[in-house]
Image (cartoon, rainbow, N blue to C red):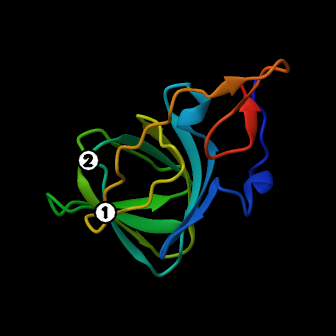
């Protein structure tokens, strides 16, 4: 069992900030559960083009207002508290945040925590190395993190 508080991730390797967003990664590939879970804020007044060529992403808005644009079709969708969208077709899309948009995001395959959008808005497909060592107390030391439960 893993229990984490969002505020405990502040300033750690699981707290990633880019030009238009900040994402705190609660569950990552190293947990080996088949998905990653992120709490992401897209900053007010920004426009973020993205394309998950290597991932499926489910997004649930828990606060704020904005717009999702399917860049392939031109369709526009309102995003507000309670809105969910699923990028199950690797759609090129843009998120426009009117106010800070707080989103809970689930990725498959899971993210490692080291991803940032490239020049095309794509997260590269990164993987975790096999677990290095399991100590007697049941923790595993991964290459890029402190001890994590095995």
Q: Which residue lies under the disc numbered 2? A: 53
Q: Eyeballing the image, is 141 above or below 25?
A: above
Residue 127 horizontal/vertical position (percent) = 44, 37
Name the residue at 61% across, 41% down: 143
Which image quarter holds the C terminus? top right
Most extreme residue toward the right, as rendered? 137
Q: Nearer the viewer, residue 67 or 43?
A: 43
Q: Which residue lies under the disc numbered 1? A: 121
Q: In terms of secondary structure, where does tag 1 sit?
A: loop
Residue 134 shows up from this direction = yes
Residue 118 horizontal/vertical position (percent) = 33, 64
Name the residue at 26% across, 47% down: 53
Q: Residues within 10 Å of mark 2 (few under 14, many from 20)?
A: some
In-image side of 139 versus 49 (left or right) = right
For residue 1, what is the image quadrant? top right
For residue 2, what is the image quadrant? top right
Q: Nearer the viewer, residue 96 or 112?
A: 112
Residue 116 horizontal/vertical position (percent) = 44, 60
In-image side of 34 versus 11 (left or right) = left
Q: CA distance from mark 1 to mark 2?
A: 9 Å
In-image side of 105 versus 126 (left or right) = right
Q: Eyeballing the image, is 139 above or below 39?
A: above
């Amino acid at each position: 069992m893993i229990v984490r508080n969002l505020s405990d991730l502040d300033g750690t390797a699981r707290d990633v900030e880019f030009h238009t967003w900040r994402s705190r990664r609660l569950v990552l590939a190293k947990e080996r559960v088949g998905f990653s879970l992120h709490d992401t804020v897209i900053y007010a007044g920004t426009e973020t083009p993205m394309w998950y060529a290597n991932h499926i992403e489910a997004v649930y808005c828990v606060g704020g207002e904005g717009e999702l644009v399917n860049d392939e079709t031109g369709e526009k969708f309102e995003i507000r508290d309670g809105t969910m969208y699923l990028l199950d077709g690797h759609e090129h899309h843009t998120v426009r945040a009117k106010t800070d948009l707080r989103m809970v995001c689930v990725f498959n395959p899971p993210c490692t925590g080291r991803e940032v959008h490239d020049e095309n808005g794509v997260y590269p497909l990164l993987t975790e190395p096999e677990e290095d060592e399991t100590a007697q107390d049941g923790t595993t030391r991964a290459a890029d993190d402190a001890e994590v439960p095995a």
